[in-house]
Every structure is written in structure tokens, then in C-alpha cells.
Amino acid sequence: MATESNPAPPPLSSALPPPRMSVGAAGWIRANLFSTWLSGLLTVTSGAVLVLALWYGLDWVLLDAEWTVVTTLGGQFIIGSYNSEQACPGQNCFWRPQAALLLVTLLLGMGWGVAAGGLAKRIALIAAIAIALLAFLPYSLDKMGLDVRLLLIANLPALLAGWALARYTALGTARWIVILSVAVFLITLVLLRGVPGVPGLQPVLVQNWGGLTLNLVLAVAGIVLSLPIGIALALGRRSNLPVVKSLCVTFIEVFRGVPLITLLFMSQHLLPLAFPQNFPVNPLFRAAVVITLFSAAYMAENIRGGLQALHPGQAEAARALGLPGWQTTLLISLPQAIRNVIPAIVGQFIGLFKDTSLVYIIGMVDIVRVGYRFVSGNTQYLDNAPEVFIFISLVFWVFTYGMSYVSRHIERQLGVGER
Amino acid sequence: MNRYLKYMAGAVLLVIALAAMACQQDAEPPAQSTAPTAAITAPTEPAAMTAEATAMPADSESTSMTNQGDSRLASVMSRGTLICASNDSLAGFGFADASGNITGFDIDLCRAVAAAVLGDADAVEYRPTTASERGPTMQSGEVDIMSRNTTWTSSRNATWGNFAPTMFYDGQGFMVPKNLGVSGMMELGGSSVCVQQGTTTELNLQDFIAQNDLDIEVVVFPDNVATNAAYTSGQCDALTTDRSGLVSTRAGFASPDDHTILAGTISEEPLGPVVPHGDEQWFDLVSAVMSMLIYAEAYGITSSSVPTAVTGDTAIDRLFGLEGSYGQEDMGLSMTAAQDVIRAVGNYGEIYDRHLTPLDLQREGSRNALWANAPCTDCPKGGQVYAAPLR
Amino acid sequence: MTELARILTYQGIPVWRHTRVIQWAAQILSAIVVVALVAWFFANVANAVQERGISYSFSFLSREYHTPIGDTFVPYEPSDTYLYAFGVAALNTLVVAVAGVILATLLGIFIGVIRLSGNWLVSRLALAYIEFFRNVPLLVQLLFWFFIMLVLPPERDGYVIAGQLYVNNAGVSFPWPTGTGQPIATLIWLILAVVAIIAGFVVSRRLSRREVETGRTSYPVLLGCAAAVAIGALGWLLVNAFAGDAPLAISTPEPQGRFARIDGGFTARAGMIVLLIGLVMYTASFIAEIVRAGIQSVGRGQTEASRALGLSQLNTLRQVTFPQALRVIIPPWISQCLNLTKNSSLGLAIGFTELTSVAQTMTQLAPPIPIFIMLMAAYLAMSLTWSLIGNLYNRRIRFS
């Protein structure tokens, strides 16, 4: 390589050390915080804001805030009035959501056993350990009984059982996990609803489901149902059949163009009129339908975006290979389109989960309403509303951040945007 | 891929089917334990069979008067629960306690109706309803009764439903911080006033401003948490709502003595339960239950002294179904319904003492004492609480 | 059998296998099903409405509304009609939507850009901002801001900045131009002012085109503004000379009476401020991510090439990266605008009298069904307008 015109590089030992300001901590600070005067100014200002915010924030959280309202409501935040004397007379019904939680942990364990990556393991472990740690909350034993605590701790063995099940039995495939997830969701519904005549499983009206469980049930139902409906609507909108297309466009635009609040009002006022006077359209079902349809309209637009971004060559090639139209759509176009818009779909799921907090409008008591009605109706807590809302924000944040974390991971694994 | 899609489609169908099933369950009576104890002339078809019931107009067993062929009473009976639109966030009247039970004065009125109809005061299904949602909720006909601190007005009577006897007399007042030095309602000109949306208070305030030509800025909030927070932080100079609300709110303040409730009221607020239009039998029944509560107090009968054998006092014997009748058969009540009611929730005075006395709402000398010459010896008298005599 | 098969063919193909026939049959079938469902629904509703004596007439619209509306941008008296009150409320929603979109877009672009900055601390803060505000329900955020707002001192001992700006927990009041009792002079000047702005715009367009064509620095923005101000000022002087009075006066806020309530100027009331802050902070976190994705979608070579040509970092962003990123940014941005408009309906939770809130109050004394039909129509109109703007703009940048 070296020719006569290019003098040989000086031997390494005689090279000058790098400038002191470009390596080590000082170097990092210089490069990342003070690279230009503008950057330095930004660092100083934002640093000052951060310190001030932390100072006042911590001062309030630790000294001024009155957190007893949050601890008083403990179980209600999770399940609303479900375990109250009115909803579940003469029994302790709290084990039912807890049992459902155990099943979910079992599934998480199976996911960990099946998945190759570290993500499933991380999520499963963090979730199970966090749940088990709840057993050590400093409540007195009559407020939070031993059975409740043991069932919480049981999540750890459940996780391991799930892992073992996936590793050492035939159940350890993705297909089985999908089937079992559906089964667990249905079992959860049955557990919460109860079965008439079965001791220990006395029916609890869905009106009494509440708290975070209600948000989760609505969100899961909405997510599972809005995806297929959204796909159907998206395909309908792109179809060249004029009637189908215009029906789909109308549906999408109407549901997307109106606030969810308004749709919920309509379901409250108009829907009962459409059914016979005594036909019970229970509020949970009503809320789930409205949220699902609202979300499906958005989902349709996301998926349509994915389909539009797809190169027409894909479909043409499939047709050229002799695949019929529906197979081209289902096997070639849709999988690629969905893969392209995973971030948008997960974003929609997050939105759906957050939107479940609006069901208070039709008289459902979700986690937000649990806090709100309590501070409102018990005047000694009237001043503690901010504490309640900060706590609820944290709960929501944990779930939604978890969802977006998973989405980013999947995105990276599929290599979206890297082609 | 094809196979997976099939599985997915199958799963989705399954979910839909089961969700539908889960929702149908409500149509069945939830449990046999809440089966009616009262002997009532009601059809035995479950409510979900409305279509069939309508198809058979000659439903001979039914005492219904509605053209739908299915009376409210019958559907409550077959459902096994009473659907009660309630408040879940107003101290004293209807609110959720720390364990999630809905309690309060208005709630006990629903419980009384459930005890009368179903023999079980706990067989109530509560529908938390916001102030501005309650009109449409009543019109939709979905609830059997609404007991939710609702003011009886003529227009509501015309559009929402029938109002049973007034169970609480209230009037709208104002509260101001003491340090503002306001001594009367007429001095509020130039102030801003917080008021809750979707209530008669909002309309009354408007009338008050217009009548007295005061320059008041109205600040509207959707619920009492926001309204009270805005008032205590000084966002508005005065708070207006029913006086009972003012008293109970003030009791919850850290320093109640810093606030004055101004003398006088600007409106009449008779509060009572409402039932949907279109079923007179049901309306009569609910009204009778309210009468039971009031007359039980007037006759000095409490939840612990309900007679089960003839006492010799004809009025008491008639009330408790031991001798004579006040029209139970025509309303579809069992003869001894009052026994169940009073045993379960107590008389009017007991309900009041249980929920409203702790909020500093004095009954003695107020309009909520029994009428002046009520027969009881040692109950608060001289007020307006009165209802149709049970005979 | 063969006879039957022969009859049941179309263009030589059995009908049950002819795509065209199947498609049309399916379409007609689905249309029938949908129409039947809709008809069943409305027949039942109409039946119930009649049976239960629920009014569904729109005649209430001409009745007097008689209820206060907290925030108004146009004069409103309680003796005005329902229809007018509905319009007042719709205007409230519209103002919040437009102001919210502008502010959220600015904040979103700012956060999105600093999210990509080389400054570690700033970029992390931007990330923290996005991850927090995106992941908490707006309803909870609004309630949170509502209580933060109440921490400010009350009106009677609020902050006064420079004697002009009043900040307190009832709102923010600042000086605002008002007419001077000569509506025609005011109107003439307002028309002149619009002309001035258009002229300034035209000047700046011309100059910037010259700059691009000739390469000479022409200060398009500066000169455009100068032109607008000059024409506006000239118009002011002329109107002043002819009418004998200035076309507009400045009204300043002033505490009045024993309650020290602030009068005059313009007061942005607490409900509106809270709703705007909540909507802007929430939507900006989404727009920031959209902006980031848009900027990242522009090839790295573009940035490198423009830096190699000597453009500064800011100029690279402004003139090279951002215009290209717009193509990716606009469609999701439009749907955020739509979301913001719809989310303004949560104003009812914190005491801002927007459309949904007023409509709900109206259902107290008027039939709910017509009100909700109007409500849905109003939101649909706003949403479709956003979609229309988006589609038009999208088409323009796609083919330019």
C-alpha cells in the first residue's frame, strides 16, 4: 500500500495523546452537552428547569401530599365496587380477579418459554415480581388479608409453571399461546361474571366491575375485535365495488369524525330506544361495542395506509403466479401492510386503552371514576384530588409505556424502516 | 399462514359468541336467592321474552296497564333486581364509601322500594348517573326509578317522568368566605359565582341575576369536585347550590368557620324519586312506599319495633297489612310489604338520622320535620314532610 | 339439468361462477342487509319515541336559551335562542381547535427537533416529555392541569405584570383592541389591514422567487413585513384623518368593585387555558414523534450534502430536511388536528363551555335526540374540513 510518495505513518508509540478534552467524562460532557454555545445554553436552561421541577415536585410528593386517600382506595382502584357488600354479598370475591391474574401470569411464563428473545423474559419477570411485591404492602392484615397476599405471591410459581409448561410439553408453540390467550380472556370474563348456582362463583353484575380491571377488559376486547373489523373496513374501502366501498367510507368517516364522548352519549340515549323497553343492553357490552367500532375506524385508516404503501408489484406478482384475489390479499398484501404499520397499530391500541377512561359517561366506574367519585362523595378527602390523579397517571403510564416499549422492540426485530 | 388465519378467525368468532352470551346472562334472574317473597300477580315469563309477551296481548295474568303488555313491576319481578339511577358522588345523599358500597339518603329510598317489591332491600342495581345525563336516562326508560337529589319541576315532570312525594325540601343558597365581608345575597353584584352544570341551580342563578339586575359572572363546572375546588381556591367569590349541599361541603372543609352560608334561598328545591312515564301502577307503588316511610315515623314505628301481629291501632295495623288494606292488591304489593320496608331501611327519621344528621343538617325546626300535627309524640314536627295517607 | 345450467349462464359462464355476477349479488345483498338494519334501528327508535312521548322536533331552536355560557367570543345574552347559543358554543370549540392546533404544532416541531439534537440532556428531556404526555389519558391530564391552575392566587390578589397583564386562577387578562364606537371606520381599517397583510405576503413571495432565481440576497421576510406595516399604518392615519378618531382603541384590564373582578381587555378564562394547555401538551407529544419520524425519513445524504455546501445546521433543517420531511409529516399531522378538535370535547370535564358541554346542558330543557344529531353533525363538519384541508395540501406537495 505504502508508496514512495506516501511517507510511512509514524510509529504508534510516538503519537500524541488525544486532547484531554475529547476523552473521558469531560470529553463526553463537552461533546454531548456543550458542543456549541447554543447547545450549552440549552443544557443550562433545561438543567435549571429540571432541578427546579424536581425540587418542588419532590417537596410536594414527600411533604405536602396526603396519600392516605390512595391507600384507602387500594382495592377499589383495581376492581371498583366488585368486592363490596352490595356487589358480592356475604362473600369475598376478590380472589376471582386474582385467579384471573394468575392465569395471565401463566401465559406470560409460557411466552417467556417460547420466545427466543430476551424481551418476553424481561417483561414476564418484571411483571410477576412487581405483582408479587404488592403482597408486602404495609396494610394491616384485616385490610389486606393473608389469602390476598398469598395469591399475589403465587404469581411467581405460576410464571415458572408457565415457563416449564412451554418448555417441556407440547403446548410450547406460538399457536397454542394464541389459543390459550383467547381461552384465558374468556375464563376471566366467566370468573368475573360468575356462574349461577356454583358456590363461590355467585354472579356479579357487570355494572359492578370497575377499576383498572374494567379498563383492561375493555381494552383487550377492543383490541382483539377492532383489528379484524378494521382490516375488513380497510379492504372494503379499497375495494372496487362501489356499494361496499361507499358503505365502508361512510362508516369510517362517521366514527372517526365524532368524539368518542359523543358516541358514548348516543349509545346511552339512542340505543335503548332501538330495543324493547325491557331488553337489557348492559353498559359493559355497550361500552365495548362503541369503543371497538370507534377504534376499528382508526384501525382501518392505519391499515389502508399500510396497503397504500405497498408496491403494486407484490399483488401483481401474486396474481401472475395464479393466486386468486382473496389469497393475494390475505397472504401477500395484508401481512406486509400490517408489518409496515405496526407502530401506528400499537399507537392506536395505546389510544384505545387510554380512551377506556371515558366510560364514566355511561355510568361505568373505571379507575379514574373510582378516585373521582370517592373524593367527591367523602368531603374530608375533597382536597386530595390531585394525589388521586397523579397516582392514576402513574398506573396508566406503566401500562402504556410497556405497550410502546414492546412495539419498538417488535419494530426493530422486524426491521421496519430498514429496507 | 392460511391455517393461522383460520385459527384467528375461529377465535374471533368464539369471542364474539361468548361476549354475546356473557351479555345475555343479564336477562336471566341472577340467582334464586333473590326470588320474590311477596305474593304478587305478575307474569312469570322472563323479561327477555318481551317479543313473545308483546305477541300475546291477552296476557291474562298481568295486571299491567301499559300497551306494551309488560308492566314495570312485572319486569322488576322477573329480573329480580330494581334498577336505580343514583348519584355516586354526593356526600350524605348518594356516594361510594371506602369499600365501594353506594350509600346515602337517596339510596335508602331505592332500597325501600326494592324491599317492598322484592322483599330484599339489597336487590338493587345502581346506575351512577351524572347530573346532565339523568334526563335522557329517564327518557330512555332503562331504569325503574331515579333517586338522585333531583328537584321536582313542572318541565321535568312533563318530560322525564313522574315525581313521587318529596322526601327532602331544599332551597338554593350561597356560601362565601367570611373575609369578603358579604352579609347578604344582594351584595353579590360584581362577584363571580361557581355553579354546577346541568342542574336547576344553574337556571335559578340565571333567574336571580336577571330579576335583581346583578352583575354576576357565572363559572360553570360539571361536578362538585371541580366546583368545590374552584371555590376553595378562590377562583370564584361565592358558591351556589342547594343549602344541604352547602352545609355538607362546608363540614368537609379544613376550617369550616371561615365560610358563611348567606341567609335566605333563591329557589324551591323539592327533591324526590322519579319513575318513568307510562306505567301508573308503578308510580302508585313507589309513591306508596314513600308514604310508608313517612307514616311509619309518624306512628312511631322503627325498624326494631315492626309489628307482626295485630296491635289494635287500626292505622298501624292497616299500614303493616295486619288488618284492612290501603290498596296493596291494585298496586301489586304484598299485604305486608311495609313490614319488609321498615325492617330493612327504617322509617323516614331513621334514614335521615343515618345519613344527613352526621352532615350537620339539622332536622329539628327545618322544613324536613314531619307536618305540624303528626300523631307521634317525640319526633320533629312543624315541617313539610307529608304524603298521601295510607288508607 | 343441463337446460337449467344453460339458462343460468351469463356470457357463457354459469352465474354462480361469474365474478361480475357474484360481485354484484354480494353488493346488492350487503346493501339490503345494511339498509334493513338501519331501517330496523330507526323504525324502532321512531316507535319508541312515539310510545314514550319523547319529543324529537327541532322547534326548540328558536326558543330562548336562558342559561349562562361561561366563555364567549361573541356577545351572548341569556335571552338569545338555542340556535345562537349552539353557534356560540361551536365557535368556542372552533377557537380552541384552531389555537390548539397552531400551538401544538409549534411545540411539537420544537420538541421533535430537539429530540434529535446532539445535546444529550435536552434530547433525553424531550424523550421524557414525549413518553409521559403520550401515555397518560388526556382526561387525567386535564384534571391535573385544572388543579395546578388553582394553585395560582385568586383574582383579588393575583399577579399583575407591568400593570397590563393580570394572571390569577380565574384566568389571564391582557389588553385587547376594541372598536371606538365608529363601526364603519373600524371596518374600513380592518379591510385595509387585510389588504396590507396580503400585500406583504405577495411582496415576500416575489422577493424570495427573485432570490432563488438570481442568487442575490433580497430579505423577503423583512421587506414583506415592512410592506404590510407601512400599508397598515398609512390606512390607520387615513382613517384617523377622515373619521376624526382612531379606528381601534386598546382596552386595558382593570380590577373593578369590591370583589376586584377584572374588567376590560381580553380575559382568557381558566377553563380555556387549562383545556388549551392540556390539549397542546398532549397533542404536541404526538406531533413531536411525527416530526422526528419525518426528519429521519429524509436520507442522511441530503443532510450531509447540504452541510458540505456550507449551510448551517438550522438552514439545513429549514431549507433541505424539513420541506422534504413534510410529505411524510402532513398525513399523520392532519389526523392529529382532527384528534385535537375532537378531544376539545373533554373541555366539559374542566368547566370550559365548548360544544359538547353546552349541548349537554341543553338536554336539560330540550329534547336530547335533535341536540345530539346537531352535535354529531357539527363535529363531522369540523373533522371533514380538516380532512379536506389535509387532502388538498397533500395533493399540492405531492405533485409540486
Image: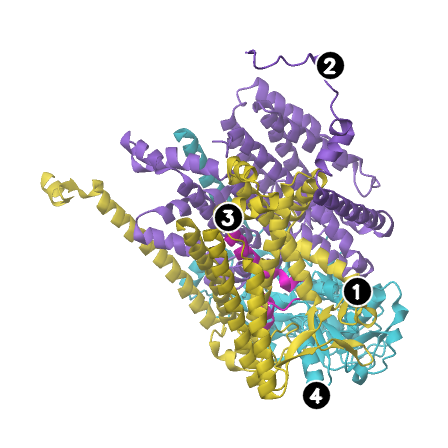
Chain colours: A purple, B cyan, C yellow
Residue in the picture at 27% in, 31% down:
A320
Q: Which residue is mark 3?
A: C323
**Along the horizontal axis of the image, is C231 left or right of C254?**
left
Q: Disc 2 vs disc 4: Cβ atoms closer than 8 Å?
A: no
**Marks 1 and 3: same chain?**
no
Q: Position of residue B244 (x, y in %)?
A: 78, 72
Residue C245 visible in the snapshot: yes
- Give the spatial CA distance, label 1 vs label 4: 36 Å
Q: Is residue B170 above or below residue A207?
A: below
**Pointer 1 local density, CA inside 10 Å: few below 14, some 14–19, many at least 20:** some
Tag 4: amino acid:
Gln
Residue under mark 3: which chain is it in? C
Q: Which residue is mark 1?
A: B355
- Give the spatial CA distance, label 1 vs label 3: 66 Å
Q: Quadrant of residue B3?
A: top left
**Along the horizontal axis of the image, is A167 left or right of A67?**
left
> SS class of the residue under badge 2?
helix
- Give the spatial CA distance, label 4 vs label 3: 60 Å
Residue in the picture at 72% in, 81% down:
B267
Q: Position of residue C301 (x, y in %)?
A: 51, 35
Tag 2: amino acid:
Ser
Residue under mark 4: which chain is it in? B
Residue at the farthest front position: A5
Q: Which residue is mark 2?
A: A14
Residue B305 highlighted magenta (yes or no): no
